[in-house]
Image (tube, grey):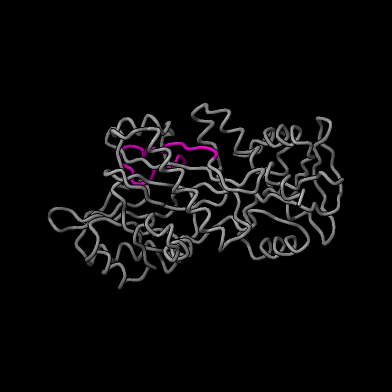
Amino acid sequence: MRNVIGILLDHKTYVGIVQKQTGYEYIEHYNRAAKGLGLIPFYMCLQHVSDKSALGLCYDNDRYTLKRLPIPKVIHNRAMTLSPYLQKKLQALAKTSQVFNGQNRHDKLRVHKLLHASKGSASYIPQAMSYSRDHIMKAMNQFISFYVKPTNSSVGKGVLKVTLMPDGLWEVCWSNKEPRVLEEQPALDFIEAKVKGQPYLIQKAVPLAMYQGRPYDLRVSVQRGGTGEWGVTGIAGKVAASGRHVTNLAKGGEAMRCEKLFLANGFNPELKREQVEKAALQIAESLSKQIPAMSDVGMDIGIDQSGDIWLIEVNGRDQRYQYKHLNLNKTFYRTYETPMRYAKYLLSK
């Protein structure tokens, strides 16, 4: 079966396919895109993969069939492989197949260093450094406001925001708790207690543009398509909940059309969108030179109050649901169709 494309899912998502309980993965869009492209999607999970074959669900003639097939030549990775066992299985799979987006959890500090070394992308990167008590003290001397965030997490988990107040005290925001206002040493102790020796980084806070008194940023879906080139599939705004310091929808943020946000800040919507797309494509090109399998990412991009563009972070497994929230149904579909077009391109090579 030459036209089979593997789609690698988390075990929970995989077993929920038949019951249509697949969380954020809208499997029907993969099926529709594959049918239009003359492909057969084969849904897999690493737990059911052996050296030369995999047990999975093959979608053909509008129905699922449980089959054991040879490892597909091209696989789109949508699984999160955090455990050493799953990482080892994924590495073995990549030796026999072209697994694109194989590495989909990107260490934030590594991404910062890679882009900082790139002439074309360095201007989009806020100042950052690895976490240590000495570096926190350095940040307090250099920045009015900064974030302390895990280098390897998502949806805003574990992020602290530290801000200098007019009276010289420090406000520390953590999760959805009431902000702490502390002197320097107690603030340092509080931050250290939350970090608990885990890998964190310190990043200068971008003074984000606001909507009705709440900061917002943009989720930009950047994907390789049918020619193998990078393109921007969609852009959606994320506005922080009142009193919150993160914009993630999972943390109470609100999805909003980017054009509405641009207009509220006096930005030309067409020009600003064009500038954001240009920045996102430059960043994707720079990173993929160092991480070749990268092909499907969701970038969090901020615009400051002066209109300058900043990369906040790169998400290797874009959940895409912001477009569904906004009824941008064509864009939502294209975020599934585009990687299938890229899979067909790889298969043809």
Q: Nearer the viewer, residue 283 or 316?
A: 283
Q: Is residue 102 above or below residue 301?
A: below
Where is residue 50 shown, x and y percent of the image?
82, 59
Give the residue at x 52% y 46%.
Answer: 298
Decide which of 241, 78 is in the foreground and name it. Answer: 78
Q: Quadrant of residue 43?
A: top right
Query: Can the viewer see residue 23 in this picture?
Result: no
Q: Which residue is rendered at x = 76% and y = 57% of the image?
A: 97
**Left or right: 53 in relation to 202:** right
Name which residue lies at 45% across and 39% down.
249
Q: Which quarter of the image is occupied by the N terminus?
A: top right
- Residue 179 makes an appearance in the image: yes
Residue lying at the far left of the rendered structure: 167
Whether 302 is among the magenta residues is no
Residue 124 percent coordinates (x, y): 38, 54
Q: In the rendered view, would you say 236 is above or below 329? A: below
**Left or right, 31 with reference to 269:** right
Q: How many dots with numbers? A: 0
Q: Which residue sits at x=69%, y=49%?
A: 76
Provide the residue span drawn in magenta.
233-251
Does residue 281 sit above or below 290 in this rendering?
above
The location of residue 266, given as percent across then percent down, is 28, 33
Q: Does 112 sit above or below residue 296?
A: below
Q: Position of residue 276 (x, y in %)?
A: 42, 43
